[in-house]
Amino acid sequence: MKSFALLVGWIVLMLPSVAQVETRGSFRLRYDLWDWFSTPNFQDNYTYSHSLLKLNLQGKVEKDNYMVELAAPYIYAVPSNASAPNPQGRLGDGGSVKAANGNGKGSVFIKQAYYEFNRDSLRARIGRQEFQDGLELSAKDSNLNWVRQNRLAQRHLGANRFSLSQRHYDGLLLQHTQRGRWTLYLAHPVEGGAELDANRALTRVNIGYLSFMQTRDSAKEAHTSKIYSMFYQDARGLAKADNSGSAGMSDIKIWTVGGDWSQVWKRKEAKIDALARFGLQTGSWGSHRHTAHAYGVEAGAQWTNQPWKPWLRVGYSHGSGDKNSRDNKHETWFPGMPSGTLHARTPFYNLMNLEDTFIQLMLNPTPKLSARIEYHSLRLDERADRWYSGSGPSDNRSFGVTGRPSNGARKLADMFDVSLTYTFSPQWQISAYKSWIRSGGVARGVYPTGKGAGLFFVETSYRW
C-alpha cells in the first residue's frame, strides 16, 4: 500500500510540468428488480438502486501517459433480508451488497492510478488499473470486434462492470507489438464487486498472465487468434466452494493454458462468423490435485442488407465438473476472476461445471436502437458436482464463489432474456433488460416452493 501511495504522489507531482491534461468522467444509474427463486420468510422479490460516478485526470509526458481516477459508488436502496441460510444463500445482488457493506451507503476510492511508458513497440504500465483478457488487440471489423468483446473476452480476468464497484488490479502490464502482440500481466486484484470500500489490494491472490494475439483484416475476411497461459494463486486460507468439502485451507495454485480463434467472412448479402476456444488446467486445489478443461464453439450470420440487420448466432459452452466427490482430485473448471454477467447476463450461475447451449438474435431497428434476444439451456456437466455462481475474489472474508447442491440432477434452468439499448449520443445511452428463468431439477431441489426467477433492470449511463 505504501508503494501505491508513492506512485499516486509521484503522478500528482508531475502535473505542473505537463503541457496537456484532460479531465473525463462517467455516471451510471441503475434500477434493479430481482425476482429470485421463491425463498419463504426472506426477501426474494425486491428492488435495488445504485449509482457509480467516476472522475479521472489523464495527461501526457512526452510519449508517456498517466491516469488518476476516483470512483464513488452509492446505494439508494438495498434489501435487509435477502440472504438465507445455506443452501439457498444470497438471493441476488442485493443480498451480496447488504452482506458486504451492512448499513453503508456510499464511498470514494482510487479506482485507477498508473503511469504508462511508451517506447516504439514496447509499452509498460505500472500501478492500479483495469485489465480484460482477450482484448489485447482490437479488430477493425465491427462484427469480429463484437464477438471478441462479448463472447471471448474477460473469461479469466475481467473488469466486472455490471457490479457496484467493478473490478481493478494493482499490477504491471508489459506489451510488445510486432506481427501481433505479446502481453505479460502480473497483478493482485483489489477489493471491488459488491464492496463499497474498494481500496485494499488482495495481496494473497496472485496472478500471472501471458498471451500472444494476432488480428488480420482484408476485403473478404477478418480473423483473430490467441494463445495464452495464466497462473492463479489464492493463499487467503478460506474454505473453498467444491463438492468435497475436504480440500482444506491450503493454497489454490492453478496453471491454465489455452487459445481461441474467431473469424468473419464478408459476403455481399451477409457476414458469417465463427469461433472456437479451449482451456486446460492443472495444479492444486488445496490438498487436492486439480485438473480441468473448458471449450466452446459458436457460429452466426448477419444479413447486412436486410431491414433491422438481423444477426442470428448459436453456440455451445462447456466447463468441466468433478465426477467424484470422495477422491483427492478436483476436476471443476475454475476461470479465476471473470466478468460474470458478460457470460451469464442474469448472474445466477457461472462457467464452472456447466453446459450452456444457446441461441441469440440481435436486431437494429434504427441506427440508435438495438435489441438482443437470447435463449439458454443450462445443465450441470456432472451431477455429482454443484451449481456454482460468483465471479471470484472481491474481499478477504469470502471465497467469491458459492456452490449449491445438485441433489443428483443435471438440468439447472432454461433462461430467456431480452435487452434494448437506445443511444442518444456517443456519450449517453439507456438500456433495459428482462429475463425469465424456468427452474430445472437442480434449482427446484434448492428452492422447492417456486418454479423460477427473473431479473429486470433499467440503466442509464453518461460519459464526458
Image (cartoon, grey):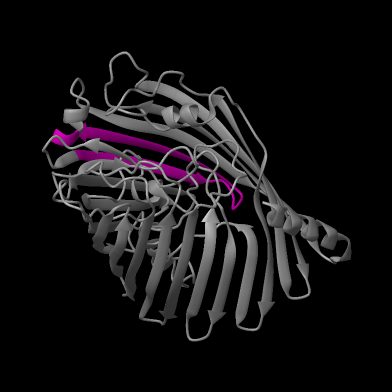
| Towards the viewer: 360 or 269 | 360
- Using the image as rendered, state which of residue 151 and residue 220 is in the foreground: 151
> Is-magenta flag for residue 332?
no
* Vertical comparison of 15 with 228: above or below: above
Residue 432, magenta (yes or no): yes
Question: Residue drawn 32% across and 45% down?
Answer: 248
233 to the left or right of 348: right
Q: Determine if residue 302 is in view.
A: no
Extreme residue toward the bottom, this view: 179
For this view, does 354 lie left or right of residue 180?
left
Q: Residue at x 35, y 17 (%)?
A: 42
Residue 246, horizontal then vertical, whole percent: 25, 44
Q: Quadrant of residue 34?
A: top left
Question: Which quadrant holds residue 147?
Answer: bottom left
Q: Compared with residue 387, is residue 333 higher up or lower down, i.e. above or below?
A: below
Q: How many marks?
A: 0
Q: Is residue 401 visible?
A: yes
Q: Determine whether 36 is above or below 409 in the image.
A: above
Please provide the residue range marked out in magenta: 413-442
Q: Residue furthest top?
A: 41
Q: Position of residue 58 (x, y in %)?
A: 73, 59
Camera-side residue of 237 and 231? 237
Image height check: is 301 above or below 81?
Answer: below
Classified by dominant secondary structure, the portion drawn in magenta counts as strand
What residue is drawn where x is 53% and y is 56%? 188
Is residue 124 rendered to the left or right of residue 287?
right
Indicate left or right for 221 with 330 as reference.
Answer: right
Q: Quadrant of residue 123?
A: bottom right
In the image, residue 361 lies at what x, y percent? Answer: 29, 52
